[in-house]
Image: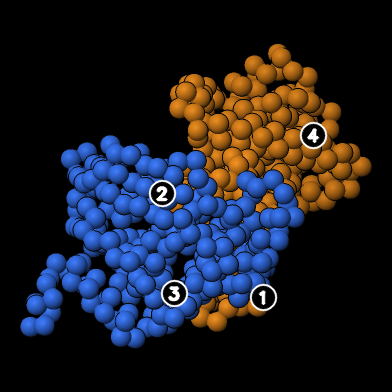
């Protein structure tokens, strides 16, 4: 079932943030939400998760769903070890053996098994972010929400994290909303990209990406073409401007 | 434990220079020296006995077969008062953190408790309770507001981002409380516990002095005072201070610093 937002508006007192968002989020696909900083991307994600109520508009498919989240800041409990951090997120699930199996599986999949007993302050920034991703995937949600989950690390680690995401995502193909301001990230990971205007945000473009995720390469001509188009949209310039 | 490559840079802990470590013992020696000089000037063991006389009185106490029972009695009362005030203050502090009604409801009670003179409380409690229980009751009333405030502040100190994460993943409230709220309150509770322990010692011994239970340091102190054995009064007081110091040290060892609230230290 496709999840949908129709004419969703949100203001914080006098500040208009979302100005009639219309978007579909097809099941088992990755939708990147791209836009300039402060345009309301995270507000949109929080509305999808039910953390914020919109002022008006219709939302279909999201209410009643289960969500897992990966944040820009990994939000790990510093006094719990790596495995216990994942188990903490799973503690609402009834079956203890299922929880342990999920935790072990996603720790292994993210290359953190050797650090199961380590605590977050003992891990590097990239490893903490991997743990945050592993936790989000370990939680058996219907929808996965990523809020700038790859942006707090350097390029090399970011690429590793994106590869990890692709691998984990292919196993369960969960409906994913991914907020980012990084065009490369959107082109590399998403099935389609929604481009938001500056605040108050509206959807100004809905770009499907045809190349299978596993065939995408940084710097390849097809990806560069999509990136150029997105740069034009985000920066509000025409193809002619770019040529000049 | 295996460390991850590229982890946080180690935090260097500055160790005090060796001569700085002597500052504490030098302070104690100076105080004893001033005390000796003052005792010499006063020239009366009844008013101010010398440290040597107090040391001898302490030897007498240690050799007394009843000293162990007095020690155990007072330790038991301090432990009971500490644990019960922790339970009570922990409960009211955590409830107040989530209930503005309870916070306002308890505010006048806490203010009254904080402002009540300890001696007045002990004298009133002597009408209500047997002598054994008076010091414990008074120490609980004095120490529980400390735990209440520490727990209240600790609950409010929990990281909002972590709380939001827990809510999103549907972590049950009891797990959130045990694994997120309580550890976040740890440093506040540790600091409150140290203050409350010192308070428990002071109030329990003061209560014993007045209520005179059978086995108590305070009772020994009062009996020595009545028989004008000033050196023994000092020896009881020294014993109380030493025990308070030892229990505070042990408490400090029992309550570890939580990683994430102050980075892990490497030498």
How would you rate the neighbour count of disc 4 (Cα within 10 Å): few for under 14, some for 14-19, many for 20 or more?
A: many
Q: Residue furthest bottom?
A: A220
Residue at coordinates 49% horizontally, 28% vertically from top-left?
A: B99
The quadrant of the image that shows the C terminus of chain A is bottom left
Mark 2 residue element: strand
Tag nearer the camera, 1 or 4: 1
Q: Which residue is mark 3?
A: A213
Among the two numbered marks 3 and 2 on one chain, the one whose residue lies closer to the N terminus: 2
Among the two numbered marks 1 and 2 on one chain, the one whose residue lies closer to the N terminus: 2
Mark 4 residue element: loop
Tag nearer the camera, 4 or 3: 3
Do the residues bearing badges 2 and 4 touch, measured as CB atoms within 8 Å?
no
Q: Chain of mark 4?
A: B
**Mark 1 and mark 2: Cα distance apart in space:** 38 Å
Instruction: Specify the chain shown as orange.
Output: B
Q: Chain of mark 1?
A: A
Do the residues bearing badges 3 and 2 touch, measured as CB atoms within 8 Å?
no
Residue at coordinates 73% horizontally, 52% vertically from top-left?
A: A96
Q: Which residue is mark 2?
A: A3
């Amino acid at each position: 079932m496709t999840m949908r937002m129709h004419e969703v508006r949100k203001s914080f007192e006098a500040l208009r943030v979302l100005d009639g968002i219309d978007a579909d989020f097809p099941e088992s696909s990755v939708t990147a939400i791209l836009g300039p900083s402060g345009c309301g991307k995270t507000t949109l994600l929080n509305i999808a998760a039910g953390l914020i109520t919109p002022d008006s508009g219709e939302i279909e498919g999201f209410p009643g769903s289960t969500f897992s989240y990966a944040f820009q800041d990994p939000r790990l409990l510093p006094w719990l070890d790596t495995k216990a951090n994942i188990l903490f997120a799973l503690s609402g699930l009834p079956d203890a053996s299922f929880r342990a199996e999920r935790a072990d599986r996603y720790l292994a999949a993210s290359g953190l098994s050797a650090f199961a007993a380590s605590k977050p302050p003992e891990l590097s920034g990239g490893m903490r972010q991997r743990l945050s991703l592993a936790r989000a995937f370990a939680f058996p949600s219907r929808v996965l929400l990523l809020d700038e989950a790859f942006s707090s690390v350097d390029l090399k680690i970011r690429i590793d994290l994106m590869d990890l995401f692709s691998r984990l995502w292919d196993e369960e193909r969960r409906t994913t909303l991914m907020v980012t301001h990084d065009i490369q990230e959107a082109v590399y990971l998403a099935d389609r990209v929604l481009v938001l205007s500056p605040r108050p945000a509206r959807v100004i473009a809905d770009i499907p990406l045809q190349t299978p995720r596993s065939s995408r390469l940084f710097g390849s001509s097809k990806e560069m073409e999509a990136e150029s188009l997105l740069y034009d949209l985000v920066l509000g310039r025409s193809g002619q401007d770019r040529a000049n | 434990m295996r460390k991850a490559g590229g982890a946080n840079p180690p935090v260097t802990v500055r160790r005090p220079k060796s001569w700085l470590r002597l500052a504490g013992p030098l302070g104690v020696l100076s105080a004893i020296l001033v005390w000796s000089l003052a005792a010499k000037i006063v020239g009366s063991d009844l008013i101010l006995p010398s440290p040597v006389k107090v040391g001898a009185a302490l030897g007498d106490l240690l050799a007394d077969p009843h000293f162990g029972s007095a020690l155990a009695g007072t330790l038991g009362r301090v432990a009971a008062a500490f644990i019960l005030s922790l339970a009570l203050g922990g409960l009211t502090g955590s409830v107040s953190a989530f209930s503005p009604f309870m916070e306002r409801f308890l505010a006048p009670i806490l203010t009254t408790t904080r402002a009540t003179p300890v001696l007045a409380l002990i004298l009133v409690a002597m009408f209500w309770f047997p002598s054994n229980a008076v010091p414990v009751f008074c120490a609980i009333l004095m120490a529980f507001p400390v735990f209440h405030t520490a727990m209240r502040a600790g609950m409010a100190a929990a990281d909002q981002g972590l709380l939001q994460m827990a809510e999103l993943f549907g972590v049950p409230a009891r797990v959130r409380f045990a694994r997120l709220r309580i550890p976040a309150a740890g440093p506040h509770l540790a600091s409150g516990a140290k203050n409350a322990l010192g308070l428990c010692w002071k109030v329990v011994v003061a209560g014993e002095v007045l209520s005179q239970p059978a086995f108590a340091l305070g009772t020994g102190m009062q009996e020595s005072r009545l028989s004008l054995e000033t050196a023994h009064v000092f020896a009881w007081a020294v014993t109380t201070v030493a025990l308070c110091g030892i229990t505070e040290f042990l408490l400090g060892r029992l309550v570890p610093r939580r990683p994430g609230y102050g980075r892990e230290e490497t030498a």
